[in-house]
Amino acid sequence: MEKVCGYVGRRGTFANFLFKACALNDDLKQLPNGDRTEIGEKGINLSGGQKARVALARAVYQDRDVYLLDDPLSAVDAHVSKHIFTNVIGPQGLLKNKTSGFRLLQWKCVTHRGSITHVATYDTLRNNDVSEVMQESPQESEDSPNSESSKISKSDDNEDELDADEVRSVVSRNSRTSRESKKKYFSKKEHGNLIEKEEIALGRVKFSVYMVYLKSMGILRYFVPFVVALVLNSVFLMARNLWLSDWSNDNIPGVDKGLAKPLGIRLVVFMYLALSALILGAVVASLKLHEPLLHNILRSPLSHFDVTPLGRILNRLGKDMEVVDLRLSSSFRFLAIAFMSVLQTCIIISISTPLFTLVIIPIFVIYLLVLHYFIPCSRQLQRLTAITRSPIYSHFDESIQARETYPMLILVANFRQMVGGTPGVIRKHCDPWKQSANCVANSSFQITFMLNFFMRQLSEIETNIVAVERIKEYTETAVEAPWRCRHPPPIDWPRGEISIYNYSARYRPGLDLVIKDVTVHIFPMEKIGLATFVFICIGKSSLALALFRIIEPASGKILVDGVDITTIGLHDLRERLTIIPQDPVLFSGTLRFNLDPTQKHTDAELWSAIEHANLKHFVQSFPLGFQHQVDECGHNISAGQRQLICLTRALMRKSRLIVLDEATASVDSQTDMLIQDTIRSQFSSSTIITIAHRLNTIFDYDRFVYGISKVLSNVKNVDNCSS
């Protein structure tokens, strides 16, 4: 509900009508907690079409006078597109009295290379010279209420036409089964919460956690030398104090004044050795703790990131590692120095005044009793502080990514209201205990002055070691299969043959299967089209995830050229395959780095791939060319250009097996046409598997999978099947 109505939104009559208009009612029924179901980071548990509809509903809920809709129907299928157009965007929809930048039946704005070239009605543009650049997008013919009259052309070739009724029957049956499967999937999550609550360790920190830090430091190499040097330093410090005591009494003969200089030198030398061993050991410990932490995070399976917010990972890599780097070694140093100071002081006083031992023992007992209550409270508060810091990191990351959306939806004021009210809630609940809190505070100050430096450092060690405990937790998480194996596949592998036998898979243990008993055989160089309703799965990309072993099989197997993909390393598998995803991935860096991250290709090969991907004019428009700086996630490049960059990367890899996961779902019709033409011409000798919800993108493929086990060949006029 918050994704549509904001933090303070309440579902009312308009919200109910809005959900229906945006085709969200069926999705809400599948969720166990309805519109109160938690949505994961970046909408990870929503499909691309669901995220598009939620974004549209959120915009309509704001009730603005002007709307600019940037291709909101590209990620949904024809039926949902027509429903949304009729009830929201069209002349009789919710935006009928609004100024909208998405009016298919009124004025059209034609752009070319960043400039507006024509603004006119569709008929005017069609009759003028610009008709050549006005290629009707597939969704226009499907979205328009008068689709039959608005089509430019329609094929009359009915040869090998599919039985539309049969396809509709299969689609309907599979859709119902998919909804039931999805409902079972969500029912596994109590109260609709995808992100599980972070666990808090209770009780004392285990001794094994201390040993993890000491072993990371190097017990024999650094810790033992530190202790030995510090003990020797304390011995010479006691000798210095005894010598000063004798030297101060001038009437005692026999005091060797020549001992002062050697004692001072030894003190400095052993303190230097002790601190050097501790500092070097702390640096080594930080590196050895950070390395397995980063290793496990980078090799964690997809299921780990489904239920783990980014803030928790940043918290471990950020604040917890900061404690290990800066504070933990200092705590060990001060604790050791304080302990040796207390010990030598007690020895010196006990030698001169034996009765002191009768006084110091009860004092130590009192201190231990105080620490018995203070350390557990301090330790648990540190754990709570560390856990509550994770949502702050998550919100900070999401705020940066949505920095353009927040002001437009006026969510800044709502967030300020939510955050500003938090101190008031805390104060309200603390007022009844105000007097007792003041009493406790006064007592705490008195106790603080009574505690000595050693006791404070002892509690500080127990508090800071919690960071090692939390890091150790993430170094023991499950990781993916090995990246390399002893027997890699042949150099010319794969040739493009895929055999899937009774394959089933699930996203995480304990969840229902998302792929059930699939058996398919694909020949080399074949072009296979998969509709999004195939394989009764929750996600539209489950088969692609299985092919790249992002999800592991529950049963069955996938053979590529006769090689079981579970018997080879993940790097050996993934570097031989190529995928062009729906959401293009770009990194912060130069354009060349994004086109050729491994730096294996020459400029000539790069320009050849760019020309085939129709990116030559785009690259030449930059003064720096390949050295043009790309922002994080490619925010300074349009969606279509980002997708063409991903296509260029695929062209340079020259893989024999390529997966297109709705690669053209979020781009305009012209970019769609460019990508499809390039794929047909440049990947003619490769096996292509295309996952699409628009059937026109796969109409000329060799085979079209439209059911659980039904594969049709020589598909023609698939547009008739989607109507």
Image (spheres, rainbow, N blue to C red):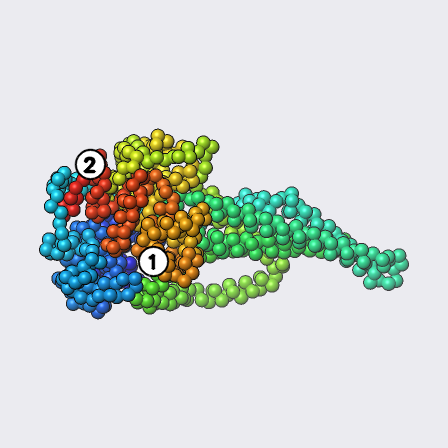
Q: Is residue 258 visible?
A: yes
Relative side of 704 to 290, left or right: left
Q: How many neighbours does mark 1 have within 10 angstroms: few (below 14), some (14-19), or many (20 or more)? A: few
Q: Residue furthest right?
A: 253
- Where residue 160 sits, quadrant-wise, is top left
Say whether disc 2 or disc 1 marks the residue closer to the N-terminus.
Answer: 1
Q: Which residue occupies the foreground of this view, 252 or 71?
A: 71
Name the mark nearer the viewer: 2 or 1.
1
What is the number of the mark on residue 617? Answer: 1
Residue 714 placement (x, y as % from top left): 19, 38
Observer able to see residue 346: no
Look at the numbered discs 2 and 1 and tell me whether their residues touch, using CB distance below 8 Å.
Answer: no
Q: For mark 2, what is the residue? A: 713
Q: CA distance from mark 2 to mark 1?
A: 38 Å
Residue 429 placement: quadrant: bottom left
- Amino acid bearing label 2: Ser
Residue at position x 18%, y 40% from top?
A: 715
Instruction: Establish if 8 lies above or below 480.
Output: below
